[in-house]
Amino acid sequence: MSYKSRFDSLEQKAHHQIIATKISKEMGELRSLVEKSPITPKRWIWELIQNAKDVHLDKGVQIRIDYQPEYVSFKHNGMPFTADNIRFLIEQISTKSRSRPEEGKSKTTGKFGTGFLTTHLLSEIVTVKGVAKEPDLDYRKFELQLDRSGFELEDITEAVKKSKESVADLDSSPIYLEYLEGDFNTEFVYPLQDKISVNVAESGLNNLEICLPYTLLFVPEIEKVEIVSSSHLFIRSKEIEKINDEISLHTVKLIDTDLIEEKIYCIVVCSFGLTSIAMPIQKDADSISLLPIDEQVPRLFCDFPLVGTEKFHVPIIINNPNFNPTDPRDGIYLTSSERVNPRIDENKSIMNEAKSLYFKLLDFAVTNNWKNLHLLAQIKSISEDYDWVDNNWFIKDVVNPIREKLLHIPIVTNADGSLISILNEEEKIHSWFPNSGSREVRNEIWEISNYWFPYRLPQFSDIELWYRLNWKESGKLTVEQLAIFVDYCKTLENLSEKIKGIEVTDWINKFYELIKKEPKDYDTIINKYAIFPNQNGNFKKILHLKKDKGDIPIDFKDILALLGNDIRDELLHKSINYDFDPENIRDKSYAVETITSEVNKKSIDRSISKKYNEAFKKLLFWFNKNTSQAAYLFPTLFKNKHLLYDDEEIIENINKAEELKDLLSTFDVTSANELRLKFENINDDTQSLLPITHEILTSMGITNIEEWENAMRDTDLKALFDHQSVPTTDMFLLSQSHIKKARMRVIAHLKTLDNYDLEDLDINTAPTILAGVYKNNNPVKIVFRPAYSQEVIVYYGAEKDALDYADAELWVDDGTEIWQVSLGHILKKNNIKKFPI
């Protein structure tokens, strides 16, 4: 033996050792990942399809896959095997080459390298059937086994040698004269030996059906793919609708060969050079709608899907055959390094090309009113543990430029169905997106806000999409933010002008219930913001309010307001539901004590007391009407009530009394009532006529010129007014607003009363009549009036008819309180002692 022969022998041994070591290492890693990795079991099908594509015929390659309980068969009708193909397949050596022809695209994706080992996860022993052909040699059929089941290097080496030996005498096998180009001459058969094999088979085939429509668009060398076991045939349509130089619409057909049914996949593609972006669409007769990309579809393709990039958060699918993928083909190198790395630089350059194509597609979709534009906004930083991407670079070069454009174009479909932008021209928030850790709360935030500003909300079906994006620039509509909006309104009246479709007090009560569903923020919200209306309609912080027990007379509240201690300012609005502690309740006794204290303080100094004459007058008036109660509730004040009279007022009253005495004597009567009756019988043509004002129109319940003209047909009513005085449009508008306000306030008040039922409420009978109201389960007719001028004029026949019933009620809103006018009040207020029956 010579040294040369020894070296040759060692070289052969070293070659086998290298092959066995490589196979052992790769199979070891795959075995450890197959049960825990969501990516690895899906790769096998794409490795086989890539290999088929690399041997396509001129018109393309056809693929046929059959999944049976015992095996998986993969066939294609591509070109025969060369000797190199067979050798590299056995020795697991890749034919991949990154060298490119002039057009810049690699001719092959790669054959029989380490990626092909993933197919052995189906079965570690694979049968390969095919036809061999070299340019100067005949066609020969062959069949060989690839056995990767060994764990020791010696076993793997022996298996490789055995495979080689099975084709070593190929020259002596019969010439294959029946070979037909285009037949399915190549087949890989994988026996399924256990549950792991079955899981791998199903994972790969499921992923194939999801991703194949895009692969057929990106890889024209694949003509069609048939999945025999599911009776599915995927075919790329040759009809392409070209919209412009970059944008085109493509279709892929999925034919169910059993049911003879078709499903059409429509996909928009925007391309420049070798870079393409794609997105599913629905094309109707007069519109195009973008569709969401299936979550299981990888976002990056190197002609074929890079399985593992499903959570690479871009709103489009990006393809370029020259992407430089990671070794397991689960991403592309987008890291950052101070050293020059052409592969990384090329990948980043392709990503920038894709970004430019995205802008073109976005502009075109917006200009042409495509639907579901919000789907193009689904971009955010990488949250997954991708070691192949520099997240800082991704945010700076991809996310931020896209977001900046998206913020200012109308891509949000609002609750009214219109398109709006996220920010306005002044860079301020224009769209508000419900935000909470609870989906239920997010939905309720939308529902309650829809009464207020539907034009600033996304449509209900998009709540979760925008919540997931969670951009820092977008408006986060939290429960606390709603509280800020309410606080900003300052008054219940201001808020009522904004709320539509619901009574403002009902809306407020719904809002309080919503706050309770955010327990972490509850105390902060109710204590920090003025969101609770008092009885003057002003929003206050809850710490500054008390509950009204309900027994404080209106007169007492008015008196305290005139005394400068307005109790309504600290009392929670009666229509608002909120539970107070017992010590935070105000009642009648408290009002009596406060009136007594305030009067005592303010009546000592006569110079000071003059400022409060109106309060003292009102209190004295109440004393006179309610003598027994006054003596009981205000014993000291009632006893010393003379101290409440102003000196000048006393003198004036004495003078008036003297004048009244003279009048009684002059007209030969003994009382003021007799005098009044005497004057009523006198037809005084010189009596002063009333000018027409909006207060009078409001007190009459008149809202337009027609109603006024009808009223003036009543000669007695007409005689009260100056014929030169004419109502104006502004008067009618003001009257309408007052009647509308009074209706709202009366309805809101009745809803707080347990014995009233307004479920069948009808406000269309007459402007100032509420029909369909039940009291104690019995129908009751309600006439209401604003009484802001402290008087009511009843002229409507419908009102008189309604009040003619025993169960009729007259309610008024005097601007501070809602109260029912009783017959006794009318008799006392007008000093009526007799009237005709």
Image (cartoon, rainbow, N blue to C red):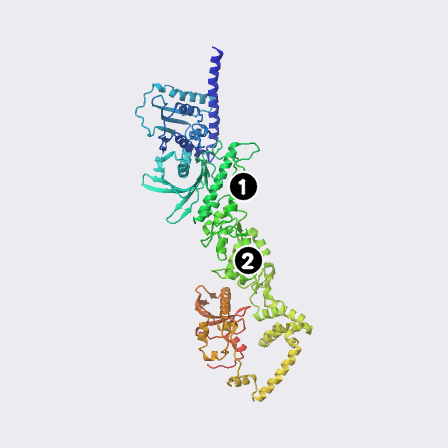
Residue 803 seen in the figure: no
Measuring from the top left, give residue 721's x and y in whole percent. 50, 78
Q: Where residue 741 is drawn, which disc sits there?
A: none
Residue sitting at the far left: 178
Measuring from the top left, give residue 128's x and y in whole percent. 38, 26
Q: Nearer the viewer, residue 256 or 249?
A: 249
Q: In this rendering, is residue 45 above or below 146?
A: below
Q: Amino acid at mark 1?
A: Ile
How many numbered circles does the render carry? 2
Q: Nearer the viewer, residue 259 or 390?
A: 390
Q: Could you tell me which secondary element the residue under label 2 belongs to?
A: helix
Q: In this rendering, is residue 635 above or below 113?
A: below
Q: Could you tell me which secondary element the residue under label 1 belongs to?
A: helix
- Residue identified by numbered label 1: 395
C-alpha span from label 2 to label 1: 36 Å
Q: Amino acid at mark 2?
A: Val
What's the residue at 59%, 55% (across, down)? Answer: 528
Q: Residues within 10 Å of mark 2 (few under 14, many from 20)?
A: many
Q: Nearer the viewer, residue 100 or 291?
A: 100
Q: In this rendering, is residue 544 above or below 790?
A: above
Q: Nearer the viewer, residue 456 or 367?
A: 367
Of callouts 2 and 1, which one flags the residue occurring earlier in the amino acid sequence?
Answer: 1
Q: Nearer the viewer, mark 2 or mark 1?
A: 1
What's the residue at 44%, 23% (across, down)? Answer: 91
- Residue identified by numbered label 2: 486
